[in-house]
Image: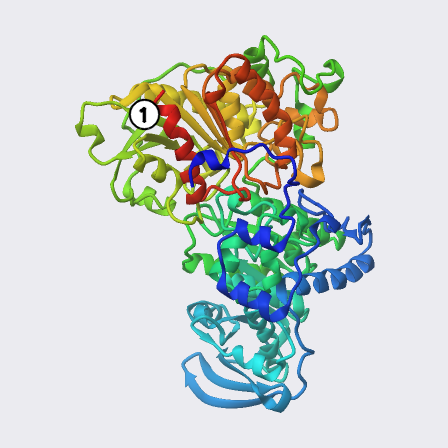
Amino acid sequence: MSFLSVIVVLTAFTGTAPSLEAFLETIPESEPFTQWLESSGESYPDFDAMTSQAPLPDPLQPIIDGKATTIETTEEWEKERERLLEVMKHWFLGSIPESPTNLVATILEDKKWEGGREQEIELRFGPDHKARLWMKLLIPDGPGPFPIFMTQETHRAWAQIALQRGYIACIYAGADTRDDTDTFLEAWPGYDWSRLLRRGWAAGRCLDYLENLPEADTSRAALAGHSRNGKTSLMGGAVDERIALIISSSSGVGGTMPSRYSGEHQMAEGIDHITRTFPEWFHPRWRFFAGNEHKLPFDLHHLVCLSAPRPVLLSIAENDPVENNWVMQHSYLAAKKVFQLYDAQDKLRILWRSGGHETWPEVIERYMDWCDLHFGNFPHVFPEEYVYPWDWEGWRAQASCAFTADSQPERPLGCDTPEDLKSIVRKFLGEEAPAVPVENTEYGIMRENQLAPLGRSSVGSGLEREQVVFGTYINGDVYMPKGTREKEAKIPAILYLPSFATPKGYAAAYKRGADAFQTMARAGFAVFCYDPIGTGRRVQETARFYDRYPRWSLLGKQLRDAEDALRAMEALPYVDTDRIWVVGYESGALLALHLAAVNDGPTGYALVCPPLPYRLDRDELETGGINRWAREMMLLPQLGLFAGEETRLPYDLDDIMQHLAPRPLVLVTPQYDRFAAPEKVDIYYNRLRQTYETSGDQDKLIRISPKKYNHFDESMQSLLLESLAPLMTR
């Protein structure tokens, strides 16, 4: 497909896929999903009839049948919990039968060891006892009764730590390493439960047996799991309230990561990827919401809420590719409201870990500390910690703002771009901290042990990488075709500004094929990359940012880093300084626009899935509105003062695009981007096109509108490069 065939002006699309056929065009094929559609006859959801909720739904203010309600008592929450669980069963989990009452246990092996004993047991239950479940118990010596630590067979090594802490450790065949839950399908063929739900439900069958074991205290039973088993543990706790404590370790998407915030637009794993890669884990209906996450009548923070007020520990690693630290914090803050309703806010915590997806003995010891704390064994301390700014009201109380809505005149769409745009933008971003330009250095470059957790130990075939330290001690990576530094010729360059991918920084945590920076480097560019503040190696920089710089903004700091990166690029001997482009994706496009407002250096800009101008982005339920930048991410808190008063903002993003003319500008605006409906993109694009046509530079403005939703996979990367090619030759 040539790029010319997808340059269109749209008037008919609304940003939501209007039919099943159109939806299937936006996502990669999944044969199991196709087979399910054919066998079930399932209809495509009527998204137009479903309530949009782009911000994370407040569990205590649910929208039921289109009406907002408020929950103020625990009794009201218990009713809402029942309703919510049924909603999640329909769209996400699948259905389950009543707990069986005909459990039969056979002891397969009973061994005595010094300090305890080990039993292998087979449970049979259900219609004609067709359902089977293997379990193993590690029981300390003594009369008990002992608390119980349940986990899946994958984590049999965890059981040893639980045993040495004085727990009955129960491991069962509900994991990839050993899974008996397919027998449940034979026993109950009329239910459509997903694989992970079956595994979670299986923990309850272990409790059925343990309730008759004299040494076991089933009132103190914990269920823990990691990764997919962390999802399983949350599901088990949701459907069986006898489970007294839940530990969800790095459960990611489908576990603790709400899909509204954790998806391809954050270069993370989204609904499409996980339902295509693991189609049996969840109910197939969940896949309908890929790209339509704001239409979900629930989200994954609700899975945590279903366990309230029982103790729940959410464990996440700083650079874990299956998760997103910023999203975890929002999931916690939302779920905490339900725990507070029970005056049980101390029963929910995040355990922030270093490293990646792995665990090690001290991590499991901390999990046991959580069990001890709540089972009365020892008062371990689990402080409440935040990694990202979150208290916008607290910021507002201390802020001294250069602009407020009541001090600014109306500036409707179509008004002239402010003549002093550059100074207005800099002032709006806050008072900059002092700085002076510095030379590039190699001191502080990342070593192999630092690159590996970020997935950067491999450069990619046909490429080479140079590392530089620039600006305020920031590590930059330049990717280029192999042999570039040996040649004397200069090549075009790209400053790559990614979306807010917290675990891996500028690299996608989950992706389809190559990262964008690799694709662009293979196309002949020197691509300059670095981790935006709050991501990758720089996660911890954000925690106290507004304490350290109360009059600045995170977006202002990002802008400082981007300008420093441009200076660093200009000093590289192989970079053609007359052909430096800026490519920004999603929140990176927001940064790119602010860079364009204050810096005239780059040759041109390419914006992939750029945000709408603030004056067009006023429907908070559809997109999150400007509060997603102001309050949710706190990138630019001052924006929040103009929520509902967007026409009084002293500048807007379309002003910056007008300011860009006649420099080359490429816009990649997918037809099904839930954050930027095409008919709204049309409004600012048509005016922008007139500006370029008036100056005779219409060939420098290109808009691509593929039948995609908001992500930056290889197909979108190819379309972008096709559009850049003719501009590079002019």
Quadrant of residue 728 in the image? top left
Say above or below: 72 vs 184: above
Label 1 sits on residue: 492
Name the amino acid, label 1: Pro
- In the displayed structure, would residue 293 be above or below residue 653? below
From the top left corner, tell me how far across and down residue 88 is, in percent: 67, 61
- Residue 720 screen position, x and y as percent: 43, 35
Residue 714 image offset from top left, x and y in percent? 41, 44
Q: Residue at x 82, y 51 (%)?
A: 72
- Residue 13 x %, y %: 64, 40
The number of callouts visible is: 1
Color style of the picture: rainbow
Classify mark 1: helix, strand or loop: strand
Give the left or right position of residue 62, taking residue 670 as reference: right
Foreground: 21 or 26? 21
- Between 588 and 232, the one nearer to me in the picture: 588
